């Protein structure tokens, strides 16, 4: 095998997983990250769940990689002494009309080979005494972890095997050469045989910079979180999710016990006013206007006006947020939650207004672009890295 030089743009968990694997396989690797630390955006702001994979379309990349990633991420944590806990979770139907959706989800989980068990309300109470439901699905292999710690360890391992890891290094221009690519930045340039774009919120821009027409555009959605007050954490033992509505794009507000013992609640989901729009006041007018007038966004938004209005209203109302949580755990009131920051999800949307439902990886000569990698991408990171290196012929 001829060893190659890879330049990876993006230092989140996927870029770092690719870097660690490719470097371990003997390839020369350069990682470029525009921020001053690794995992500064999506990876560092997620809910820290090792997903099991009951939701995803059987046979999809999400389904296969999440199921495999559940095991590989747990093994990686164990081998590297990183704290994690396979605590399981409950997906609950709070009204009788939701039970049929719960049974459909149970069937999909079985197809995806995810260990699950249908529970009555009294059986669910054995796991979560404060939960309110008429039925539940117990997902045994869901866990919790700190993906920031995972990312830092991946970066350390990549360095140990010779990778060049460049922080505060933003790509400014990409040129396709006869034998590869040349990526310019403020302090110089990197020439390589292969470009791997793992830029997350900016992945479509990097693709365009490299001369591609991306199959979808990234639209940023802000996920807003609360957490339970310390004295109320006892109300939640593990993870409690509502049964998802297939007509809606996200899973809904849920409760997650984090690896540090805190209990996070959320996320609420609203369109961010910029790719780093972590609050209503963090506005990038050029980005926001570009998103609003993108035909795909307009088509998607027009189909989800009631949902969008509810999410925006809940963003400004602690009472509405608490009421959403009280559907799952009635003992939670508005005074029991504290603001706990937010994250921004890079969601790919086609020009037809469809949310890209699966991981999206677009290829060109000497280029691989990861254009849609929302949840469960962190769980699946080691599997996505394996898929990319195999596809590029780096494993031979």
Image: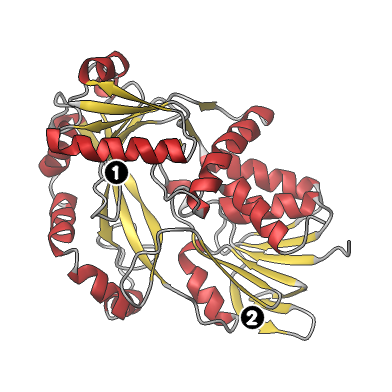
x then y, percent, for residue 44: 48, 47
Give yes or no for contact between labels 1 and 2 (Cβ–Cβ under 8 Å): no
Residue at 45% over, 40% down: 111
User: Please, what secondary structure does the residue beneath circle 1 have?
Assistant: strand
Give me the C-alpha separation between circle 1 and circle 2: 37 Å
Q: Is residue 315 left or right of residue 239?
A: left
Where the C terminus falls, by quadrant? bottom right
x then y, percent, for residue 273: 29, 67
Q: Residue under circle 2?
A: 174
Answer above or below: position of 146 versus 60: above
Residue at 79% over, 66% down: 5
Where the N terminus falls, by quadrant? bottom right
Answer above or below: position of 280 versus 194: above
Q: Residue 32's image quarter?
A: bottom right
User: Please, what secondary structure does the residue beneath circle 2 have?
Assistant: strand
x then y, percent, for residue 301: 22, 69
Q: Residue under circle 1?
A: 225
Hey, which residue is sitting farthest right in the picture? 1
Answer above or below: position of 195 versus 11: below
Q: Is residue 38 visible?
A: no
């Amino acid at each position: 095998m001829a060893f190659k030089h890879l330049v990876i743009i993006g230092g989140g968990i996927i870029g770092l997983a690719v870097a660690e694997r490719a470097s371990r396989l003997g390839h020369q690797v350069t990682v470029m990250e525009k921020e001053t630390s690794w995992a500064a955006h999506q990876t560092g702001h997620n809910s820290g769940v090792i997903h099991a994979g009951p939701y995803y379309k059987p046979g999809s990349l999400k389904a296969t990689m999440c199921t495999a990633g559940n095991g590989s991420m747990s093994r990686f944590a164990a081998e590297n002494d990183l704290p994690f806990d396979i605590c399981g979770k409950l997906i609950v139907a709070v009204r009788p009309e939701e039970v049929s959706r719960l049974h459909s989800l149970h069937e999909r989980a079985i197809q995806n080979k995810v260990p699950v068990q249908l529970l009555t309300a009294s059986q669910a109470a054995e796991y979560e005494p404060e939960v309110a439901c008429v039925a539940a699905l117990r997902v045994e292999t869901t866990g919790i972890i700190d993906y920031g710690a995972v990312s830092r360890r991946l970066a350390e391992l990549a360095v140990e095997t010779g990778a060049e890891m460049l922080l505060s290094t933003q790509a400014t221009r990409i040129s396709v050469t006869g034998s590869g690519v040349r990526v310019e930045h403020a302090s110089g340039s990197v020439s390589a045989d292969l470009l791997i774009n793992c830029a997350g919120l900016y992945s479509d821009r990097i693709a365009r910079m490299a001369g591609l027409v991306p199959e979808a555009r990234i639209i940023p959605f802000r996920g807003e979180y609360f957490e339970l007050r310390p004295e109320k954490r006892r109300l939640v033992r593990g993870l409690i999710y509502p049964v998802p509505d297939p007509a809606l794009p996200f899973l809904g507000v849920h409760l997650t016990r984090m690896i540090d013992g805190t209990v996070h609640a959320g996320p609420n989901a609203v369109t961010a006013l910029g790719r780093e729009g972590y609050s209503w006041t963090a506005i990038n007018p050029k980005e926001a206007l570009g998103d609003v007038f993108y035909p795909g966004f307009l088509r998607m938004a027009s189909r989800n006006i009631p949902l969008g209005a509810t999410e925006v209203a809940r963003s400004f109302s602690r009472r509405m947020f608490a009421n959403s949580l009280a559907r799952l755990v009635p003992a939670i009131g508005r005074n029991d939650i504290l603001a706990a920051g937010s994250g921004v999800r890079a969601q790919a949307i086609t020009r037809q207004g469809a949310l890209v439902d699966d991981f999206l990886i677009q290829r060109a000569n000497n280029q691989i672009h990861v254009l849609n990698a929302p949840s469960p991408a962190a769980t699946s990171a080691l599997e996505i890295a394996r898929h990319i290196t195999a596809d590029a012929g780096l494993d031979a």
